[in-house]
Image: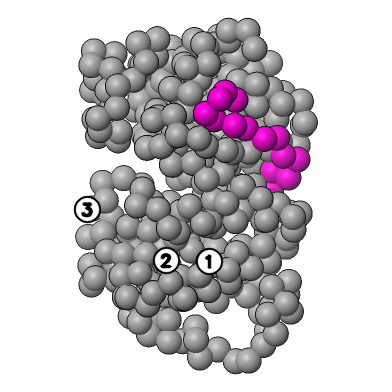
Amino acid sequence: MTKKKAAVLGAGSWGTALATVLADNGHDVTLWARRVELAREVMADRTNSRYLPGIQLPETLTATASIEEAVAGKDLLLLVVPSHSMREVAAQAAPYVDGDALVVHASKGFELGSMKRMSEVLAEEMPHTEGIAVLSGPSHAEEVVRKSPTTVVVASHQFASAEQAQSFLINTHFRVYTHPDIIGVEVGGSLKNIIALGAGLSDGLGFGDNAKAALITRGLAEIARLGMAMGAKPITFAGLSGVGDLVVTCTSQHSRNWKAGYLLSQGSGLDEVLDRMGMVVEGVKTTQAAWELSRRYHVDMPIACELYHVLFEGKSPRQAVEDLMARGKTDEMEEMMTGDLE
């Protein structure tokens, strides 16, 4: 692909990692940081010490705290901000986005209140753009910046937009597949963070591999049930943005959601855990969203609901597990595909 101009909004670990991928591919990349100090660090020291310690960033990468400078005249706009900030940042960027620019997001979560997916938020704030796509899949930033083999998907309602995003990002260590099911890709990427919180709790309580394997499997069933109710294709959850992302987030040392769950299992309160993490833990807000969505779509999500009780109602993690195990008898295949609330 010929050299293009790209803006990455969000200078956390994932945004910075994706900016390095684009820079490695020869594109002209500007990374937008909310904090002036971080933009200056990237430019002066070629580092992002808070989010990616020990990593040297490409010399060709530009950073700025000016959203106009970052966005104006770019061919690609890649938003990598927390879900609760997406609408605000998109609204700030919208006046400077060219109508023919490709807009992609790599954020995982729902907008609390409206319960909209991130692509829906972007469509509302940037109605003049021609294409919106989502990037998702098993991809820890710490491994991507070290050029470890990574495979992800880009999904869009417009196949041409997915293909264009694929061309921007694909290289020999970062493989990108296209995908037509933007709903399924967004739902899978968001809800897996809830199950990762549960995996951290399970590991912290010493429940072992049997329990975690069951949690991942039954968690995938919950994700698929809600996703299908929202219009996703069932097969999507067997792919990279479904089971692939779920497995890596539930089992990796890099997973902040797993770590948050582990800390909760050791008796720390939610506020204390979030303060200690120092970074956004999307699974917490997504658990709130899943609680609301399960009722809106009349879908039974026992794992997500028990985690909601633990996070926001002070329920004991051990009691939550006991209550999950004590649920009434059912058939696995029936519960995988149905399970509506009474």
Name the image colouring: one colour
Q: Are marks 2 and 3 in contact (CB under 8 Å)?
A: no
Q: Amino acid at mark 1?
A: Ile
Residue ID at (37%, 15%) = 58
Q: Gap between marks 1 and 3, in whole Å?
A: 26 Å
The residue indicated by pointer 3 is 276
Location of the C terminus by quadrant is bottom right
Q: Gap between marks 2 and 3, in whole Å?
A: 19 Å
Residue ID at (75%, 37%) = 157
The crowd level at tag 2 (other Cα within 10 Å; few <14, some 14-19, many 20+) is many
Q: Is residue 98 above or below residue 162?
A: above
Left or right position of 202 against 152? left
Helix, strand or loop under label 1: helix
Residue 276 pos. (x, y %): 22, 53
Q: Amino acid at mark 3?
A: Arg
Nearer-the-camera pick, 61 or 314:
61
Residue ID at (60%, 25%) = 170
Q: Which dot, 2 or 3, sits closer to the camera? A: 2
Q: Are marks 1 and 2 in contact (CB under 8 Å)?
A: yes
Q: Is residue 102 visible?
A: no
The residue indicated by pointer 1 is 216
Q: Which mark is residue 199?
A: 2
